[in-house]
Amino acid sequence: MGPVKLFHNSNPVTIALKREGTKLSLVDFIAKKCPSIVGPNAVYHPTPYLFNGHLQTAYASYYNGTSSKQEIEYERELLSLPDGGQLALDWAPIKPTDMTDKTPILICLHGLTGGSYEAYIRSVLEVITRDPFNYRGVVINSRGCAGSNITTPQLYNGAYTEDARNAIKYIQQSLAPGTPLIGIGFSLGSNILVKYLGEEGDKTPLVAAMSVANPFDFKSSIEMLHQSILGRRVYSTAMATNLKNSFKRHMDMLVKGGKIDPEKVMSSNTLCEFDEVCTRRLGDYSTVNNYYRDASSCRFIEFVRIPLLCFNALDDPIALKACIPYDEIKINPNVVLATTERGGHIGWFEHTLSPTRWIVKPLAEFFVAIAEAYDTRESSASSLTPTEVDAAVDKFQSKS
């Protein structure tokens, strides 16, 4: 148990509340619209038996947090990329066809070897795409993820933002001009999103974004992860195993470039070993450390030019608290960091009998508040209070 703590610039950017005819600083906006982040109720109470980051992270590995009665259904679209590769875009509930409909949309980037099926993505989309909100969502599945095929000898990685850039541009072009686009990334996806935002600056079509469990500094994260037996033999090994399983499914295509030795890839035992024999070679990096340096979004977060809300748990055993770029966050008036003492890696489970993710509530609060602030539709519903947003989250999570 512990309060949510905020870190931010002393002179944050302002956000216009068009319906209310006022402007608020980003911090005051969050304080008014997001009671799970600021205020007397901004306290995270972990599930009693998931009392540390390791247990939270372990539970997250098999949690199925979407109501079986209301599973998220997607409409899949394959996006061809300039280099011949492809991405799978999963639209929720379906891809819009009305080019006059400016309903705000949430663009989701998943974690390492994940996809649109992940519970942490579905639990958010389940809320915001249904009554009383009826917003839209789309998941950008990285190359070869979520059952998609790889069509070139190119694998995704934490430094490569071009796929996200192409996908976001395509999504923008597929929607009515002026549709508010809001981004969210989880773990590796949050790093890619923040790096992309820093590279784009004020040129991004996104109006705001959220970063969840971002590792920020790849080199330091890997080094510290491997300093402990648990980090090296459990977390690093598990991530390497997931990557090898993904590699095995697409091996025939990935070896065509002649850059990697499949036997060495399949014999790698840790994340660092996999990145050395596969990731950095496919990405044309001279050393694995150069890949880690280039991938680290901590180098780019100070250049983000849209409102960005970051969430990190300080007991996260993968996105370690020592790697959070506090100074770079504080010098950027567009960024607010929210931390909790507990939560693990994309865990944040609360309640005892049927744990659900607390993090869904503040994410939904912020998304809905931003969507309403930028929603220009004359026929859009009246603003929902934060209490009504939280009640909607509770309704869906009670069915999980």
Image: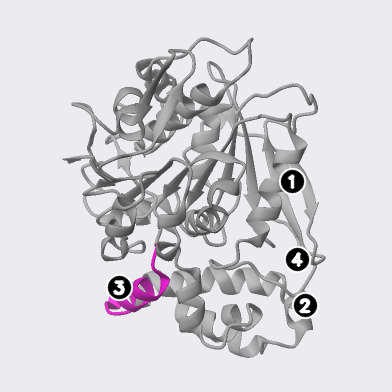
Q: Quadrant of residue 261?
A: bottom right
Residue 101 horizontal/vertical position (percent): 72, 22
Label 3 is placed on what type of residue?
Leu
Q: Which residue is mark 1?
A: 170
Label 4 is placed on what type of residue?
Ile
Element assignment for label 2: helix
Question: How far is the residue under mark 2 from the one under mark 1?
Answer: 29 Å
- The first of marks 2 and 1 along the sequence is 1
Q: Quadrant of residue 228?
A: bottom left
Highlighted magenta segment, given as a residue range: 216-230
Q: Which residue is mark 3?
A: 230
Labelled pair 2, 4 in contact (Cβ < 8 Å): no
Residue 8 horizontal/vertical position (percent): 28, 45
**Residue 305 has which mark?**
none
Label 1 is placed on what type of residue?
Tyr
Q: Which residue is mark 4?
A: 150
Graded by Cα atoms within 10 Å as few (under 14), some (14 to 19) or many (20 or more), the crowding at tag 1 reads: few
Q: Which residue is mark 2?
A: 252
Question: How far is the residue under mark 2 from the one under mark 4?
Answer: 10 Å
Residue at the location (34% across, 37% down)? Answer: 355
